[in-house]
Amino acid sequence: MKISAQGQVVSRTQAGFTMIELIMVIVILGILAAVAVPKFTNLSSDARAAAVKGVAGGISSGNSNNVAICGVGNAACATVTNCSNGSLLLQGGALPSGYSITAAAISPATSGTTKTDCVLSDTTDTTITANFTVTYTP
């Protein structure tokens, strides 16, 4: 307490944070950073895996459309005799850059035969793969 010149008691209010409060905030932020950083460090490989699955899904979807188109005798029917022909089934008729398809013939080579283990790979990380389905269409 402080007494003013007039004899009145003047209370002094404290402004700001104490050192202990500041240290506690820094410790809490450190703990949050230690927990959160490992969760976000490997997102690029997860994103690549999701992208590969998305392209593989697009090929499988295009395959379904192609089988229907071929079934009605439309001239737009794409010839699919190998897994590598899966790129023809995508919009634009080409595989996006950064991806490759492992070639594998569809056997037996008869119309309607389905091959479910065609493999699409990310060219920058060949361990990232996804399977897709194609159907033989002459």
Image (cartoon, helix red, strand yellow):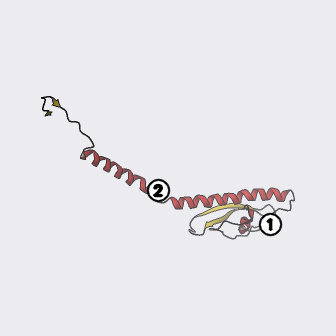
Vertical placement of residue 137 versus 26, above or below: below
Give the structural element (helix, strand or loop) at label 2. helix
Question: Mark 1 or mark 2, which has the lower sequence index?
Answer: 2
Q: Dividing the image into 4 quarters, which one contains the C terminus?
A: bottom right
Q: Residues within 10 Å of mark 1 (few under 14, many from 20)?
A: some
At 62% from the left and 59% from the top, the residue drawn is 53
Q: Dividing the image into 4 quarters, which one contains the N terminus?
A: top left
| Near-viewer residue (28 or 123) | 28
* Residue 67, numbered circle: none
At 42% from the left and 56% from the top, the residue drawn is 37
| Near-viewer residue (36 or 63) | 36
At 79% from the left and 67% from the top, the residue drawn is 109
Say which quarter of the image contains residue 98. bottom right
In the image, 70: left or right of 24? right
Which is in the foreground here, disc 1 or disc 2?
A: 2
* Residue 40, numbered circle: 2
Between marks 1 and 2, how big is the CA–CA gap? 43 Å
Query: Where is residue 104 drawn, in percent x and y?
Result: 70, 70
Residue with the most extreme front position: 6
In the image, 87: left or right of 130? right
Query: Where is residue 121 drawn, in percent x and y?
Result: 62, 66
Query: Where is residue 100 drawn, in percent x and y?
Result: 65, 69
Give the structural element (helix, strand or loop) at label 1. loop
Say which quarter of the image contains residue 17. top left
Query: Where is residue 65 drawn, in percent x and y?
Result: 77, 56
The residue singled out by tag 1 in the image is 79
The amino acid marked with disc number 2 is: Phe
Vertical placement of residue 20 versus 129, above or below: above
The amino acid marked with disc number 1 is: Thr
Q: Residues within 10 Å of mark 2 (few under 14, many from 20)?
A: few
| Near-viewer residue (8 or 12) | 8
